[in-house]
Image (cartoon, helix red, strand yellow):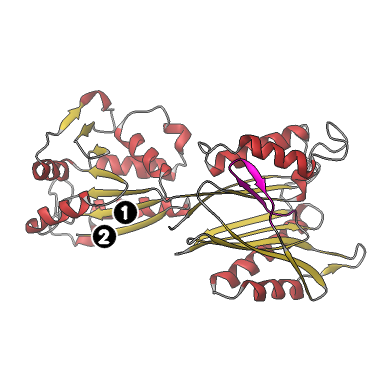
């Protein structure tokens, strides 16, 4: 069983600083997710530069398939040590999460990773090794659906120091809070936000340290397939529709002509809901067996505009037009598969123009780029 990793991150700058002295990088690969969280010594610009350098070195090496041990050795040999405090200029946590369920984690001087299973913190056993005189802790854990994995910087555990918690929030209080709030109906981003808000409250909205939080939610992948535009070869209509209907996950049709083809193939009526029409977005329709049916190019163009203007899920939560429904669906799944027909629609383009200039194709590619930038997996098939 292949697992999927959804992540959310939050950071708070130390009060009075323009930059966070911590750095977070998370990236998705074909069969894994890589993560690096680094805490630069001190705060402000210098700490940010050192933390960012640490993470970029780590991620560059991981992306070139170098072993985690070699990455750690390079970092420990590269990063300087403060002569005054005899401390490393940057601490770090590096991890790789694989789709088959295993995770490799290496940490140096950072708070231990937190594994929450069935709303209880599960102990993680680390092995200690010395690399270039530095004590490195590493572990391999096997994950399962429903698990939460949380990485934090020292700023989380120090929250409330001198105030509500004289010695800081601490490990027991922080993990106890996470156990109480690790509801499966939360997204990773919502969980990270909830922790950050509480930390900020403990600091009385004036953090005494840089704060970084990375939350990973382990679950099954959620997919959607979008069929938009008839195939260039009309003889392929039946084959394409059959293949589309066999896809797992949510099924979406964007385009009136495409919807009519599918409606004819499955022998079900296509019912248009005029109440969902707006001045800029045509109405949606209902078709048995299909999760969402919208108009084509105008709706896709509006979705593209909303993505580019950063109108995320909360901005469209209560709207019922086709573009809002489509954007909300895109943001709620992990993998979007576009099947783009290349039949020319004379209403939208000059038939003498090459297909590369097709408006529909261009908009789909731009939407795909925007979704990838938000951590989504996207693939596009042209028919």
Q: Is residue 154 above or below residue 207?
A: below
Residue sitting at x 40%, y 46%: 333
Give the side of residue 77 with respect to residue 338, left or right: right
Quadrant (top left/top right/bottom left/bottom right) for the N terminus: bottom left
Residue 360 visible in the displayed image: yes
Residue sitting at x 56%, y 38%: 190
Read off the magenta span.
111-124
Q: Is residue 374 above or below residue 80?
A: above
Are discs 2 and 1 less than 8 Å apart at CB? yes
Q: Position of residue 134 (x, y in %)?
A: 81, 70
Q: Which residue is mark 1?
A: 337
User: Would you call the spot at circle 2 few (<14 residues within 10 Å), some (14-19), or many (20 or more)?
Assistant: few
Give the side of residue 132 with respect to residue 61, left or right: right
How many labels sit on residues?
2
Q: Quadrant of residue 24?
A: bottom right
Between the residue at mark 2 and the residue at mark 1, the CA separation in whole angstroms equals 8 Å
Q: Which mark is residue 360?
A: none
Residue sitting at x 72%, y 56%: 48
Q: Which residue is mark 2?
A: 381
Q: Secondary structure at mark 2?
A: strand
First in sequence, mark 2 or 1: give its number. Answer: 1
Q: Nearer the viewer, residue 108 or 376?
A: 108
Residue 14 visible in the displayed image: no
Residue sitting at x 29%, y 34%: 322
Q: Position of residue 310 (x, y in %)?
A: 47, 42
Q: Secondary structure at mark 1?
A: strand
Judge whether residue 30 is colored magenta. Answer: no
Q: Nearer the viewer, residue 194 or 318?
A: 194
Quadrant (top left/top right/bottom left/bottom right) for the C terminus: bottom left
Q: Position of residue 329 (x, y in %)?
A: 37, 40
């Amino acid at each position: 069983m292949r697992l999927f990793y959804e992540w959310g991150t939050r950071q708070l700058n130390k009060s009075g600083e323009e930059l966070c002295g911590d750095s977070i990088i998370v990236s998705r690969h074909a069969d894994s997710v890589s993560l690096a969280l680094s805490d630069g010594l001190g705060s402000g610009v210098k700490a940010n530069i050192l933390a960012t350098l640490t993470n970029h070195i780590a991620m560059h090496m991981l992306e070139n398939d170098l072993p985690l041990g070699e990455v750690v050795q390079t970092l420990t040999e590269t990063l300087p040590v403060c002569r005054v405090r005899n401390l490393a200029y940057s601490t770090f946590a590096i991890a790789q999460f694989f789709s088959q369920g295993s995770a490799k984690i290496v940490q140096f001087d950072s708070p231990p990773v937190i594994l929450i299973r069935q709303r209880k913190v599960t102990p993680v056993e680390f092995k200690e090794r010395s690399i270039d005189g530095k004590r490195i802790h590493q572990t391999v854990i096997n994950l399962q659906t429903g698990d939460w994995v949380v990485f934090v910087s020292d700023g989380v555990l120090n929250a409330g120091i001198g105030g509500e918690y004289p010695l800081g929030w601490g490990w027991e209080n922080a993990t106890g809070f996470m156990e109480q709030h690790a509801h499966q109906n939360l997204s990773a981003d919502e969980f990270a936000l909830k922790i950050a808000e509480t930390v900020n409250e403990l600091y009385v909205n004036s953090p005494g340290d840089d704060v970084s939080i990375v939350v990973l939610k382990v679950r099954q992948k959620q997919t959607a397939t979008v069929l938009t535009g008839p195939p260039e070869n009309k003889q392929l209509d039946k084959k394409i529709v059959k293949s589309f209907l066999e896809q797992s996950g949510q099924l979406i049709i964007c385009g009136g002509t495409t919807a009519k083809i599918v409606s004819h193939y499955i022998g079900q009526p296509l019912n248009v809901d005029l109440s969902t029409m707006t001045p800029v977005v045509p109405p949606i329709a209902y078709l048995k067996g299909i999760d969402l049916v919208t108009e084509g190019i105008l709706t896709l163009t509006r979705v593209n505009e909303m993505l580019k203007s950063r109108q995320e899920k909360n901005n469209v939560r209560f709207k019922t037009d086709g573009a809002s429904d489509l954007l909300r669906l895109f943001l709620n799944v992990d993998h979007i598969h576009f099947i783009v027909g290349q039949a020319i629609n004379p209403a939208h383009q000059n038939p003498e123009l090459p297909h590369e200039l097709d408006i529909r194709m261009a908009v789909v590619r731009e939407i795909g780029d925007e979704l990838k930038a938000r951590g989504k997996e996207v693939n596009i098939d042209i028919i």
